[in-house]
Amino acid sequence: MTEASPSVAAPSADPKVRPELRRFCEIVGEGNFSTDPIDLYCYSRDLAPIPYDLLYAYGMLEPELVVRPRGVEQVSEILRYANQRRIPITPRGGGSFAMGGTIPIEGGVVLDLCGMNEIVEINGADLTVRVQCGLNWRRLAEKLAGMGLSLLAYPSSGVAATIGGYLGTGGGAGIGVPRNGVAGNSILSLKVVLADGSIVETNPWDSWCFIGAEGTLGVICEAVLKIAPLARQRCFMYAFNRLGDGIKALESLARLRPFFLHFLDRGAAGFLNESDNAALDEAAMTIVAAFQGTDRQLAGVSRQVESICKDGKRYPEDTAEHEWENRFKIEISFKRLGPTLMLQEIRLPFRFLEKAMLELAEALKDYRWGVQCLSSDHGSVCLLIYALTDERDKKRFYKALSLARVIPRIGYRNQGTVYGIALHNSVHLARIHPRSAVEAMRAIKRRFDPNNILNPSKTVQTRVPRLLVTVSMLLMERVPGLMRLGLSMVKFLPRGLIRSGLRVVGGQLR
Amino acid sequence: MKTLDSSKMQEVINDIYSCASCGYCRFGCPVFQRVGFERLAPRGRILALKRALESRGEIPETLRESIYMCLQCQNCQVQCPMSIDFPKIALALAEQYNEANDLPEGPAMLKERIAKESNPFGEPRGERGAWMPKRELVPGLEHLYFVGCGTSYSATRIARSIVKMLDDIGFQYNVLGAEENCCGAPLFRVGDSAGARKLIEKNVQKFKELGVKTIFANCAGCFKTLKHAYPDTFEALHVTQFLMRLVESGQLKFSKDLKKRIIYFDGCDIGRHSEVYEEPRELLKSIPGVELLEYEYNRDQAMCCGGPLLASYPDLAQDIAADRVREAVEKGAEIIATACPTCMVNLKRGAQAADVKIRIEDIPMLLPTLVEKNKK
Ligand SMILES: Cc1cc2nc3c(=O)[nH]c(=O)nc-3n(C[C@H](O)[C@H](O)[C@H](O)COP(=O)(O)OP(=O)(O)OC[C@H]3O[C@@H](n4cnc5c(N)ncnc54)[C@H](O)[C@@H]3O)c2cc1C
């Protein structure tokens, strides 16, 4: 899609913008910035239903301005100026990440990159494509498919997610990942703007520095991706009554390197039946797999799949196809049943999956819950764990929020980790990475962004002391009513006081 | 209006809370794709509404503009994993703005004009049938051609094409002319459903007097309203469905060919809102020589042309249409065929903005010179 200059200017003319920030408006030009209160609110939220009061208590500031740059030069000018003035910049793509990566906790300016959404070049001969960072994955996948080409990996949130956002989060799971490895494997080069405004073009190895940095080290503006000819595909779907059988099959299927690998547990299958009239067996595990290759390869794969899944019940191929067609939606389509969904993601080695599932069943016994697995890469699965709740029933909801502590702990106990750090998991950094790795990451951050303007208080830093988070999570679990009352009062404290308080009790930016 | 009456939002409250904020709605939202800020995407509006519901109903001033800038094209619902009906939420809000008498300038003027002249353009009521040669109403005829405001006053070539074609094959039907009232669609859009119902009553009265059984409309907005908001004692058809029936029964034959690459533009009212996708295509394919092309995003995925904002935000409507015209050119089309006068008019403006020379015609306008005459 080509975007010309927008015809509706943001309702905010310069006067509302603080003089120090006007330079940003000049850089992007009329119609490409906003101080509209609805925008400022929306750009301080992401997918997770975290109550505003809680973010307030953790010292969140509101963004003052949202800008939509139209090219790498504008991004460079924006960062150069922000760096001179020490103004926080939060990069944002589709805003579909649930870890608070796009929440501008230190205020400042949100850099909405969705206006940079062009396909710069498709090279069918060399099998590469050069795209801008704000392009949507589904749009790119469909454009390529129309030319007989295919992406190597893309997220199942591709209808919303952008190139830069997926790479920013690490692209560790998704469609194509079980076959081709994590999204970073398909990157040949990135054009990145660093905190001081300099523009660098990386080689495949340097690219890894920015992939998964959650927008804290640089702004990815363009990417050159490897692509492949569109291959023939076959889909399979099996239901297993015994979890153990399902897990064994899943692990063996993963070794065959499917393009898409997904499973639903009993709870998730039930949700889909209830909300989408899916008519699925509510079996312990339902697996959907899609393989790509030549007709001969697919015939071979088909025999192997049949033998691997001999203990399962096979669904007709068109049901399997339907799940594939629905791949962008199945993960949240049943949200209506909540209507609030507490969603946690953990990544685990296969061999701990059964144990973790049993622990989840115990921990979630008071909830309506379910599990799906995002296509995994070799050797591990990425679990999406849902518990239904209703944010209007505050007491229940606050209790459900404490699952943000309970579920990752099940992950850690089972040699696993969380999927993404950004804001919400940054307090647990010490659990997620070895100390030496954390130190190395912080050194890199200081090197790349000495003035700490790029997505500050995320990923390698935290404003909120871990003890405070642990205590508040425990309170939510045990006395949610009290916690709610407390938080509604915190709202009356000035932000400045909260932020200095947090500093005193140990929240620090390193 | 400064506060929201949450008791009046009960019907849509579950939809509001079911929103996951995933942002899928932005994918096919033409307004968002053009302007690019969250306040103009369903996700952003829902976030603002949720916040209002949780803060004693206080709503930001800019929400009103954002709500009236929704095209109600329903593409967001198709993309939404939870199938949230955002237009329904927007209408529930528009009802409140309407009741509070707090409409933006455009919709307020439109309401006034309809009250006075029964059309949203404020054209004299008596001239509604001025486009057609004089004809008498014949009680007892089964078929009625419902012309609609846009076609009666501006896109009159569409109406003249339909009448010529049907007269050429000797088909009998009624046209209400000056006795036709606005179908009510524009009033539903601005949140005045009570006003719309009054118009419906007036039209229904006329239909009954004439003994009408089947109504066909060339305006997709009228067709949608006739189909969904009028009593189902009348069969409502889009003119392309009706003409396709005539083709199938052999009453309508094409004696000349049209060697053109034609791309069909799925309008929202006939497409997503009424799920009529195939008959317009079939009709085009029944013309000898036509090569039918498809938009990259077609049928339920089709992107709106921006037409509903033609009166209130003409520049934005034109920019959106320009995108659709460019997409058609990219596909190699020589003609964009529409099934809705608003789409046609707006796409023509879009072509100007995009500085592209391409024929844009409503389907009935392509046909009269090709039809085999059968005058009895
Ligand atoms: C239904 C659903 C399915 C999902 N499936 C998957 C999946 O299969 N795999 C998966 O990994 N995740 C998945 N997710 C999570 C999320 O959608 C992905 O992480 C997604 O890739 C984020 O992209 P985005 O454009 O929305 O990024 P955002 O949410 O906008 O940003 C994510 C992070 O990246 C940073 N960032 C954004 N753009 C840039 C840039 N250009 N340069 C540098 N940093 C940047 C931001 O600061 C932020 O920290 C899913 C979510 C949903 C709702």
Image: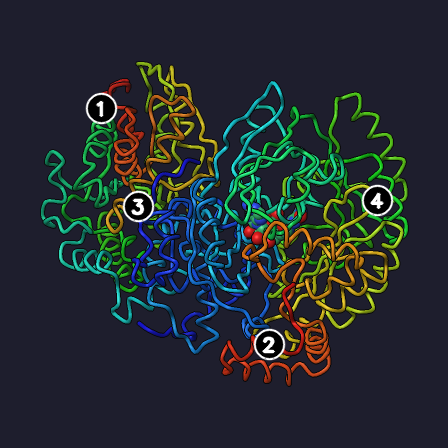
**What element does badge 3 sit on?**
loop
Is the shortest distance between ligand 1 and the CB of mark 3 under 8 Å? no
User: Which is nearer the N-term, disc 2 or disc 4?
Assistant: 4
| In this view, A262 is above or below B39 | above
Residue type marked 3? Ser
Residue in the image at 66% along x and 40% along y = A322
Q: Which mark is residue A393?
A: 2
Residue type marked 4? Gly
Q: Which residue is mark 3?
A: A7
Q: Which image quadrant is residue B158 in?
A: top left
Quadrant of the drawing holding the C terminus of chain B: top left
Q: Chain of mark 3?
A: A
Q: Which image quadrant is residue A379 in?
A: top right
Q: Chain of mark 2?
A: A
Q: Chain of mark 1?
A: B
| Left or right, residue A27 beside residue A405 | left
**What element does badge 4 sit on?**
loop
Q: Chain of mark 4?
A: A
For the residue pair A1 and A358, the one nearer the viewer reads as A1
Q: Are marks 3 and 2 on the same chain?
A: yes
Give the spatial CA distance, label 1 vs label 3: 45 Å
Q: Which residue is mark 4?
A: A379
